Amino acid sequence: MRPGRPLNLLLVALGAMFLQQTFASIGRYMPPVIAPAIIDDLRFDAAWVGIYVGLGAASALAVQLGCGSFILRHGALRMSQVALLLLAAGLAAAATGSLWMFALSAIIGGGGSAVSTPASSHLLGRYSPPRYAPLVFSLKQTAVPAGLLLLGLLGPLFSNWGGWRFSLLMAALGCAVFAVMLQPLRREFDSDRIPSKRFHLSDFGTTLKVVLRTRELRNLSAACFAFNGLQTVFTAYFVVFVVEMGHSLAEAGLVFSVATFVAVPCRILWGWVGSTRAAPGPMLGMLAVGMAAGTVLMGFSGPHWPLALLGLVASILSATALSWHGVLLAETARLAPEGNRGGATGGVLSFGQTGALLMPVFYAGVLALGGSHGLGFICCGVPTLAVGLALLRPVRAA
């Protein structure tokens, strides 16, 4: 192998997985981002957004616990293609406008998006230098806020042009087209697949045992639960929150886009810090405390707040609740058993999906009972504060 070839392969893998995650985030979050238009047209209650997100998270939980065997058998790149095609199918189902098809969309799309991160982690883990893995994974994970940025701009724009159904179908088309474009890369990036690997129901238990066996992976699982739950609540409800305070969908989408853009440099920054300056545990603890502070500020916001101030608070949440992924995923890949990075990543992320399942439903319950978005945000920030204090405790003792 020529000296420059490993670097070239790393760059190609990083670029491919960056775009894969961009389209995956578009496919997963397009319905919640344009939810105000859907709610207005179909006369749904806003609390149904949480149910939609919760169904997607339940599907993702099951898929992430069992996807490790499929990644080993078919290859990380092939499973990335499958993920994008499932997301395209889910978006097309939602475009019908039927309540039952929305439920099916959440299940299909949640399963598709669940495969994308373990597959990309498995692939990048092969080509990343261990020391710089947090930076490499963080660069890849900037695709998520990049996708949300595009959603905040294009979702309302497409909805104004052709309606919310047009927005969903355009996102579905993008996911399907890029899945096909990945095919030429499969020979190299799926060269480590194990065709004889079979899926067994016991794989679910095996995956859980892998991530619960060591204290470090247990801590990462707890952090993923709290962080992913809050992130899901923020992405699902922030636009609805701003619109219900009297602002237009376009204004809410713009604020959401600007805020989520903050996560792009922050993910790179945290990845660089995690590669050169700080241990992952304390760093994730500080981010957790920042998330809790952001939810408190969100809880005190109201209709009298200008858009700029709402954007500032959202940016705090973006810099923390949308920016932890690279460090946590790189640390998971480092601690995973050799050859099982995808499975271990899926196991840790399954706890994240549990948070993504429970917190939006809990938020919807708070909203239905008390009618307060602010109280919902504060309640969802409590687990992040608990995790942050736990991760920082060894630092204080030292």
Image (cartoon, rainbow, N blue to C red):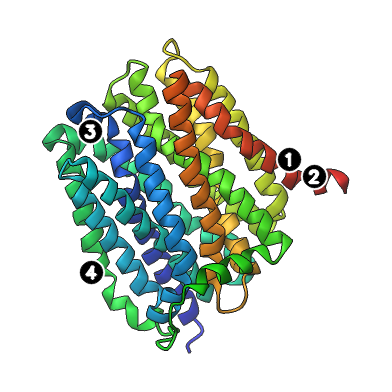
- On the rendered structure, is 323 left or right of 97? right
Mark 2–mark 3 distance (CA, rounded to whole Å): 45 Å
Do the numbered discs 2 and 1 sit on residues whose CB atoms are within 8 Å?
yes
Do the numbered discs 1 and 4 sit on residues whose CB atoms are within 8 Å?
no
**Looking at the image, which is closer to me, 24 or 12?**
24
Residue 13, by quadrant, is bottom left
Q: Residue, x 48% and y 45% (percent of image)? A: 356
Secondary element at image label 1: helix
Q: Residue, x 30% and y 51% (percent of image)? A: 27
Compare marks 1 and 4 and give the one earlier in the sequence.
4
Mark 1–mark 3 distance (CA, rounded to whole Å): 39 Å
The kind of residue on which mark 1 rests is Leu
- On the rendered structure, is 304 left or right of 228? left
Q: Residue, x 43% and y 10% (percent of image)? A: 304
Which residue is identified by label 4? 180
Residue at the farthest left position? 162
**Looking at the image, which is closer to me, 49 or 398?**
49
Image position of 170 with respect to 210: above or below:
above
- Percent position (x, y) of residue 390? 74, 44
- Percent position (x, y) of residue 220? 64, 55
Which residue is identified by label 2? 393
Which residue is identified by label 1? 389
Secondary element at image label 2: helix
Residue 81 visible in the shown view: yes
Mark 1–mark 4 distance (CA, rounded to whole Å): 45 Å
Do the numbered discs 2 and 3 sit on residues whose CB atoms are within 8 Å?
no
The kind of residue on which mark 4 rests is Val
Residue at the farthest top position? 304
Q: Residue, x 41% and y 58% (percent of image)? A: 114
